Image (cartoon, rainbow, N blue to C red):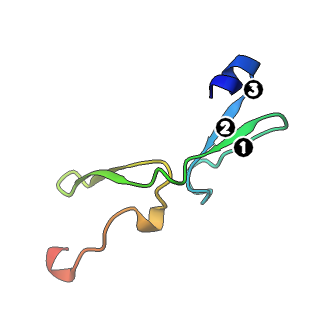
Amino acid sequence: MRTATALRVPVVPQGARTGLSGAANATDGCIVLSLTRMDRILEISPVDRIAVVEPGRRQRRALPRRSPSTA
């Protein structure tokens, strides 16, 4: 990032590469920054039905599977 900033090269962040949440669109001369290794679940609130996840988390893996008894 320091080098890209110093050289004024645009950086485009890229999440899990599913294309389901906006997709990264880089143009010529850009650097694509892969965030796929940032894939942790940070917080789950079953009451609010909200999960906070890092950008590399794939949607199919977003939440742990629940057993029928906890559904």
Specify the farthest residue to the front. 3
> What's the residue at 66%, 37% (across, down)?
12
Q: Earlier in the sequence, mark 1 or mark 3?
A: 3
- Quadrant for the N terminus, please: top right
- The amino acid pointed to by label 1 is Asn
Nearest the eye: 13 or 23: 13
Residue that mark 3 sits on = 9
Nearest the eye: 20 or 39: 39
Q: Is residue 35 left or right of residue 70?
A: right
Q: State the SS at label 3.
A: loop
Q: Position of residue 41 (x, y in %)?
A: 34, 54
> What's the residue at 62%, 56% (across, down)?
19
The residues bearing labels 1 and 3 have C-alpha atoms spaced at a distance of 15 Å
- Quadrant for the C terminus, please: bottom left
Residue that mark 2 sits on = 12
Q: Position of residue 35 (x, y in %)?
A: 55, 47
Q: State the SS at label 1.
A: loop
Residue that mark 1 sits on = 25
Task: Report the number of discs.
Answer: 3
The residues bearing labels 2 and 3 have C-alpha atoms spaced at a distance of 10 Å
> What's the residue at 56%, 56% (across, down)?
16
> What's the residue at 63%, 23% (across, down)?
2
Q: Nearer the viewer, mark 1 or mark 3?
A: 3
**Mark 1 crowd level (few <14, some 14–19, many ≥20, 10 Å Cα):** few
- The answer to the question of whether label 2 and label 1 lie on touching residues, with beta carbons closer than 8 A, is yes
- The answer to the question of whether label 2 and label 3 lie on touching residues, with beta carbons closer than 8 A, is no
Q: Is residue 4 left or right of residue 15?
A: right
